[in-house]
Image (cartoon, grey):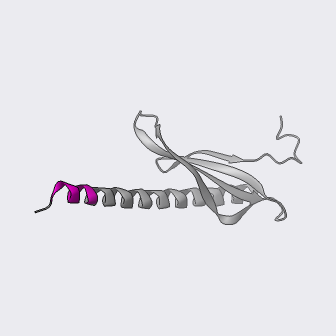
Amino acid sequence: MIGLPEIAAILACVLAGWLVWDTMKARETANDAMRAACERSGYLFLDDTVSLVSVRPMRDEEGRVRLARVYTFQYSDTGHNRRNGSITLLAGAVTALTLAPDPSRTDALS
């Protein structure tokens, strides 16, 4: 007979497995979005990966609580410099993508 401690342990393992799988899926989504954004802008996506900065609960447009993940990454316009950017995902959908403005462009400040 399975007791309450065993059921709790099984549920904890299932929850941990889901969280790991969901985090890996979100990271791949962020990587794909950054590759596409850097390609569109003519930038190099350095290290070919994003780094998780934070995970927190947040409400979506319909009021449901979802996990919001913020990732940072580095990119370059020449290959000789590094610039920082960030991407935010809410429930696996990209909600914000930030590339640092190019200091050589004056129209980026307007």
Callout count: 0
Residue occupying the far left of the picture: 1
Q: Is residue 109 visible?
A: yes
- Nearer to us in this view, 6 or 77: 6
Image point 25% across, 55% down: which residue?
8
Q: Is residue 28 left or right of residue 109?
A: left
Picture coordinates of residue 27, whole percent (x, y) = 54, 59
Between 70 and 77, the one lying in front of the other is 70
Residue 4 part of the magenta segment: yes
Query: Residue drawn at (88%, 41%), measured in percent from left and top?
Result: 106
Q: Is residue 8 left or right of residue 80?
A: left
Location of residue 85 with respect to 79 vertically, above or below: above
- Residue 52, above or below 56: below
* Residue 53 highlighted magenta (yes or no): no
Residue 5, x across and y down, in percent: 22, 56
Measuring 47% from the left and 60% from the top, which residue is drawn there? Answer: 25
Can see residue 43? no
Q: Give the quarter of the figure containing the N terminus.
A: bottom left
Q: In the picture provided, is 34 more to the left or to the right than 82?
A: left
Image point (48%, 61%), residue name? 24
Could you say which is closer to the camera, residue 8 or residue 14?
A: 8
User: Within the image, what quadrant is residue 107 found in?
Assistant: top right
Would you say the magenta stretch is mainly helix, strand or loop? helix
How far from the left and from the top, in percent, is residue 44?
74, 63
In percent of width and height, residue 74 lies at 72, 58
Residue range highlighted in magenta: 3-9
Q: Quadrant of residue 96?
A: top right
Q: Where is the C terminus found, in terms of image quarters?
A: top right
